[in-house]
Image (cartoon, helix red, strand yellow):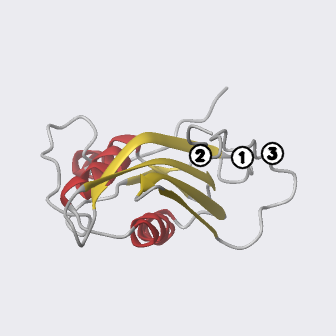
Amino acid sequence: MSRKPRISKAAAQSLQLGHQVETPASPDQAKVDRVPNPHPGTDYLVRFVAPEFTTLCPITGQPDFAHLVIDYVPGQWLVESKALKLYLTSFRNHGGFHEECTISIAKRLVKEIKPRWLRIGGYWYPRGGIPIDVFWQTGKLPGGVWVPDQGVAPYRGRG
């Protein structure tokens, strides 16, 4: 028999899930909800892929685009997916360099859900003809956890 995570009624009402929520005006204003991990004693991988992440260049104000891949091994908490989507969407009007956005997302998730391990790959589309890829992870991957390749091909122009 599967075990259902227990969320108190008050905690469930505080989640953005199941409620109409406006897009946060900035990443700092975004709420990152977490829910109990139904298998806290089991090491397994959770992957989120955001192939249409957008933000703004802090100098020119022009849009920047990235394909983000977030892998993590949960501890006691999972990130709630609607909250993650709203958080990522909050970057649309945020001015930040590729490195700042990628690392800020990872560190915010670590702060909120305290995973056993987390890795982010930020595959940024070219700006000025140069693609920028940003990678970060916490510590060492727990033994025995299978982590597939992030599946994002390196950028190849017309050559």
Give the image quarter of residue 93: bottom left
Q: Earlier in the sequence, mark 2 or mark 3?
A: 3
| CA–CA distance in space, label 1 to label 3 | 8 Å
| CA–CA distance in space, label 2 to label 1 | 30 Å
Numbered label attached to residue 7:
none
Q: Is residue 74 visible?
A: yes
Q: Which residue is mark 1?
A: 44
Numbered label attached to residue 146:
3
Q: Residues within 10 Å of mark 1 (few under 14, many from 20)?
A: some
Give the image quarter of residue 116: bottom right
Q: Nearer the viewer, mark 2 or mark 1?
A: 2
Indicate the position of residue 26 as horizontal and vertical percent values: 19, 63
Q: Amino acid at mark 2?
A: Tyr
Q: Which residue is mark 2?
A: 155
Q: Residues within 10 Å of mark 3 (few under 14, many from 20)?
A: few
| CA–CA distance in space, label 2 to label 3 | 25 Å
Q: Is residue 60 left or right of residue 65?
A: left
Q: How many marks?
A: 3
Element at label 2? loop
